[in-house]
Image (spheres, rainbow, N blue to C red):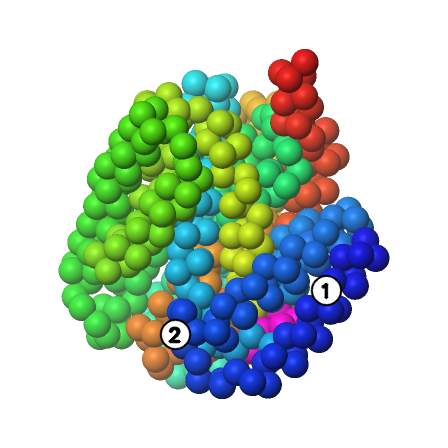
Amino acid sequence: MIRSALIVLTVVVLMASARTFVPTSISELASPGVLLAFGFLVIAAVHVGNLFAALRLPRITGYLLTGLACGPDVGHLVSSSMLDSLTPIGGVAVGLIALSAGSELNFRRMQPRLRTVTVTGLLAVPLTAAVTASLTLVLAPRLPFLAGMSLSERLVVAGTLGVVFASLSPSVALALLSETGSDGPVSETVLGVVVLADLAIIVLFAVAHALAAGVFHIGAPSGNLVRGILIEVFGSMVVGIAVSATLALYVRRVRTKIALFVLAICFVAAEVGARLHLDVLIICLTAGLLLENVWKVHGESLREELAPAVLPVFSVFFAMAGARLHVRDLRSVGALALLFVIVRGLTLFAAGRGGASLARADASVWRWMPYGLLPQAGISVGLAVLVARHFPTWGGGARALILSVVTVNELVGPVLLRWALVRSGEAGRRLDGARHDAH
């Protein structure tokens, strides 16, 4: 623990010194400043994560706080242009997370929990969207970006915000399951629900966005927007099928440098997908599901091959997410954001327990699974950016509120989920199973 603290202090001092020689306008991916930022984030985030692990806190919370402390809003060690140039790393991380999440979901093994996953997902997303949208309408007099709007305009804005607030976080769930070595009904149910929920959010946001565009007379006709989103979703699935076949063939025939090949595939999927308006998350999630359930490439063996690459990619990804959090937004709408966090959390918790009860799930799932619905990251930030870009009259204020809520949920949610995994007794089961198999 002391060693990690000393390393963090050393690299911060070195980064602060080196930063004075790097122009703030640097944006090229191969520039020395960007490479410096990448190396700094890897070392600092990993060792802060070690400190948090020693305190029995999630490593990813350490990664997030590292990025927040060193990012443009606080420490200024990593500039906005550096973060923009590191975007391909984020794409690779999202692809890696989605591929791992898909390969975790074995339908045959999950069959006893499919009912719980489906019922909980179908209950949690609409209920949370409706409750947070209603809260937005109730608080309209205190939300400046809703001032002067008609009732119909407020309704579509509230609906759009409700969908964004209902989004969950497969990336946080998978990172914590991997970090804690968790395995069992709670872990499998959490992962299944958050993946299903985020797929539903993509479709619901397309509908909400189309309605808002129609009401505010902005952008493409709503029919074109919905068609574009559907093409994005189903086109990504088709590409995911091709990716899964390619990966399965490589794993079976070549069998060497698998981690490097998977990282290359994730990079290509992220970069080409962005240019073709496809979603790397859906591409790689589809590929992971097919690898595990159709091609019979066992996810556990694939994750073992990827283990050396996961730590640096995950640490930089979550550090970048932390660096993009906006402390100024949190200060400006802090009290209202905290109210949204509480209402969202209580609604998701009630939906989680309600879904588990309706599906007659195990007592452990009923008790601990709802904590896995609380973290929020990734897609929420992306949707907030889209709202601000497409609706300039009110999107900036909405973005500030969304990012403030996400900031709190990113920092608090992982702590609660890790605690739940430990208390459920599932933390460490995967490691214990590996040791048992070795003997």
Q: Who comes first in sequence, dot 1 or dot 2?
A: 1
Q: Position of residue 168 (x, y in %)?
A: 50, 49
- Lateral position of residue 192 relative to residue 157, left or right: right
Above/below status of 293 relative to 10: above
Is residue 31 on the magenta stretch? Answer: no
Q: Position of residue 262 (x, y in %)?
A: 39, 41
Residue drawn at point x = 63 percent, y = 74 percent: 15
Distance from disc 1 to disc 2, alpha carbons, whole Å, reads 26 Å
- Lateral position of residue 46 relative to residue 88, left or right: right
Above/below status of 95 relative to 14: above
Residue type highlighted by circle 1: Val
Quadrant containing the C terminus is top right
Secondary structure category for the residue under label 2: loop
Q: Is residue 126 visible?
A: no
- Lateral position of residue 191 relative to residue 339, left or right: left
Which residue is labeled 2 in the image?
A: 28
Stretch in magenta = 68-74
* Residue 8 numbered mark, or none: 1
